Amino acid sequence: MDAFKAGRRRLDLDLVVAIVRALGVDEPGTARWRAACVKVHGLAKSGGPVGVFGQLPTDLATFTGRREELALLIAAATHHHDGDRANTVVISVIEGMAGVGKTQLAVHTAHELVGAGHFTDVQLYVNLRGFDPELAPADPSAVLEAFLRQLGVPAHQIPTGRDERAAMYRDRLRERSALILLDNAADEDQVRHLIPAGVSCLVLITSRRSLAGLDGATPHLIDTFTDTEALDLLTRIAGHDRVAAEPEAAARVIEYCDRLPLALALTAARFRSRPAWSLAELADRMQAGRLEAISAGGRAIRPVFDASYQALPDRAQQVFRLIGLHLGPDFSAAAAAALAGIPASEAAEVLELLLDEHLLQQKRSGRFELHDLLRAYAHEQANTVDPDQERRAAVHRMLDHYVHTAHDAAHLLERGRPPLNLPPPQPGVCLEHFADHERALAWFTTEHAVLLSAVGHAAATGFHTHTWQLAHALATYLDRRGNWYDLAAIGHTAIEAADRLADPLGKAIARNIVARAHRRHGNYEDAQHHLRHALDLFRRIGNLDGQADTYIELARVKAWQNPPAIAEALALARQAHALYQSRGHRLGQAQTLTAIGWSHARLGDPAHALTYCRQALSVLEEFDDRERQAHAWDSIAYAHSCLGQHSQALACYTLALDLCRDLGDRPLEADILNRFGDAHHAAHHPHAAHAAWQQALDILTELDQLYADQIRGKLMLSPPCDPSAAHPTHQPALPVRPGGR
């Protein structure tokens, strides 16, 4: 090992030949080794090749896109004398995931700069092999020796020590306009001694690892291509006519490559070499197996990812594999911790490492995501390395995390929600908790897409209890946001899961979810069908809270149907009130008092309506139940309108609107705005009425709600909105009631 060590000053010819023979090389082979040693001795004596100043690799003819990134890099290189760092070398670090095109961008930038007359004295290039699967990273001392030789220093004058070589290197470049391209850097230590001191120098560094610890460096994080750039690269390599002939297939290929430049280049090169293939056939091959299909000749995408993955510590490899099992599109540190069964603090550290390695992306604070190809690669690694039982345990922990966290958030969204006896989470599950309604709502908004995927994934993988429990936790959020098609979908999935379990509670809850979606879509008979089934199931298991909730939902259906059956709705609300009363459920009683009051107002008895709703309001305020307070103020306002007390009605509607906007309940906001407009119209405020109806219509149009046409009819009969009256700043005084607010 000592005899063949790189950088030896002397080479003993006889010792080399003896070692080669001892290792079993035959005589012709030994002769070749002897000849090589003689040649090296000759080069050492003569000093070898020197004075090679133009080292840049060839610019690719297929380079495309990156206009913004290119402009930033060129500006940083050419305008640095105007800023605070005029006396320092410019260091631009191009970072990004494997295959994103860092080297091509750096080489193209270098050629553009040199072609424009910048850094024309010297251009040095080295591949530092930071992530080479076969060769070790380049030794900075050896790189310095090569650079010094290229700068004209004879071999016998080059110092032996790294620090001395670095000093000579800086001295040789001090007064020269030089561009140094350090490609594929492993870390900061590898490049630190390769940076010159001259202010007329530019250093371009590429790395798939963050070099944030490199002093004076400006990072340039490179993302995947836009769709336009991806199509342009595909066209340049595969040929315009073949790509233009199949635009839909081209879009599929770009999607399967997820706009990663290397993946696109390899795929396009393979397609170019197969003139008999159609682009649709290529897309079908990619659909069947993306990682296998992305290759050309001896190059493929998988070894590129292998190099990044294998450079990780064991724990980071495990976390990377398991997050490949996540449902996407993004996830939190707590979800990653649950997958890996590790504490949240440890998961956060590993995710930071994966970010530094550019194996993860973070486009917003607290959220992490995998590029689609890396997700496929991580999933593949998990299937290869982790046994089936461990993978299933990881998914179980992840679903536990979402079920328990979602139910915790749902209780803050819906005060007085009947508790569900969830089984304890698996060991190692990290849960999230919320201080208030706003944080719970923000969590649902962030995790919306993930939770929908989790419902489907749980059903598909046999976690049927998780399926209906997740749907139950998600239902109120979806209803308030107007996502009623999603509400119906998760409800039907929950019914199937609960049926497989023969779980009457799950079946009853799932049918209530589907009924809510049917009511929102105006399918009142279907809604009643599911609610009757739910009521029967709740009765069979003796669940009084479930029965009461179902009666309330039936009352809503009766009140909404056309023509409305208000008397039946009132009777159903009274049945719900009796059940809540028997349970001592004060919030439930308050909710039903509001429903009873609303029904009285609709039946032409606004005085009794006010009595019931004010009773409800005192309890709701005590429990800080803002959702039901909004309903109570809305009902009180409607009763005042029925009594011709327009000033009081407008004030109450304003309170109701403020509450429902805080809740994020879009359908309720539209309902109240509609009645708010009616109250303004009755009070002879036509412009304010028009403004309120228009706001209601905007929401209902967005939600694709059925009764939007009714409001359009009102707007056609009202004058256009006066901007000065559209959002009045002064509201009528709040009506006085016993006990105050």
Image (cartoon, helix red, strand yellow):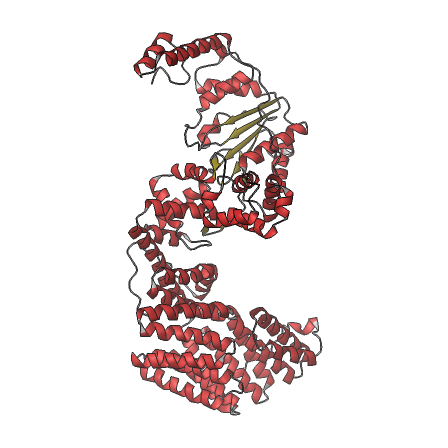
Q: Position of residue 416 (x, y in %)?
A: 38, 74
Rendered image quadrant of residue 425: bottom left
Q: Is residue 186 visible?
A: yes
Image quadrant where one finds the N terminus? top left
- Marker count (numbered): 0
Q: Is residue 604 above or below residue 109?
A: below
Query: Eyeballing the image, is 101 above or below 589?
Result: above
Q: Position of residue 207 (x, y in %)?
A: 49, 35
Q: Is residue 591 visible?
A: no
Residue at the extreme front: 276
Tell me where residue 139 sits by quadrant: top left
713 sits to left or right of 519: right
Check the image and report above or below for 720 versus 60.
below
Residue 718 lies in quadrant: bottom right
Q: Which residue is drawn at the image coordinates 52% and 88% (left, top)?
A: 602
Q: Nearer the viewer, residue 105 or 646?
A: 105
Q: Is residue 117 above or below residue 70?
A: above
Determine whether, in the image, residue 540 is placed left or right of residue 258. Answer: left
- What residue is at 35 percent from the left and 84 percent from the top? 579
Front residue (pair 364, 475): 475
Q: Nearer the viewer, residue 32 or 308?
A: 32
| Residue 423 spot, x, y in % from top left | 29, 64
Residue under the point 30% across and 14% down: 22
